[in-house]
Amino acid sequence: MSRTRISAYLAPELAEALTRVAALKNTSVSELVEDAIARSFSQAGRDAEHAATLAKLDMIARRLARIEHRQDCDFELCAHVARFVMSLAPDIPEEDRAVLNARGAGRLNNVIQAITSRLAAGKSLWRDRFAHESPTASQQSQPEAQAQ
């Protein structure tokens, strides 16, 4: 491998230390300086990779925060809907409560089974009806991937 000659000015103490270390390692000063420069450049590359990784993790954290916020909004909406529906329900006489509670529990189980079976089959009422109105996460990430 061909090498290019360069000249550098160092403080006398640093030059003496460089000569001593080269003698201890049984190598030339030139090889020692070349190795130090190579290590410095490789560290700069690692720093850039680290910064890029942190930027991606920050982006993922922001996306997860948005998802969490939307999920909180959905839960809040469900709670208000349930409260509204229950406020409209008529008072139930005490003798009919056991029968109606059992019927309600059965209906709730049917709803939960229907939801879990649809989700397990990969179906979603949200995706079927409303997903076309807002871009999906995969569509949102495509412009970012193209920009990189």
Image (cartoon, grey):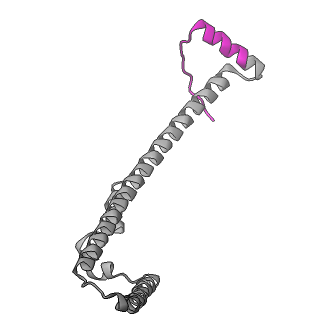
Q: Residue 129 location in percent, x, y?
A: 27, 82
Residue beneath the point at 31% across and 78% down: 126
* Quadrant containing the N terminus in the rendered view: top right
Query: Which region shows up in magenta?
Result: 1-21
Which residue is more in the foreground, 104 or 24?
104
Residue beneath the point at 24% across and 85% down: 90
Q: Residue 131 location in percent, x, y?
A: 28, 75
In the rendered image of this protein, does residue 74 appear above or below residue 114? above
Q: Is residue 3 magenta?
A: yes
In the rendered image of this protein, does residue 57 appear above or below residue 33? below
In the rendered image of this protein, does residue 30 appear above or below residue 115? above
Which residue is more in the foreground, 51 or 87?
87
Q: Is residue 101 magenta?
A: no
In the rendered image of this protein, does residue 60 appear above or below residue 21? below
Can you tell which quarter of the image residue 86 is in?
A: bottom left
Q: Is residue 102 left or right of residue 16?
A: left
Residue beneath the point at 73% across and 23% down: 27
Residue beneath the point at 36% across and 67% down: 138
Can you tell which quarter of the image residue 147 is in?
A: bottom left
Q: Is residue 142 visible?
A: no
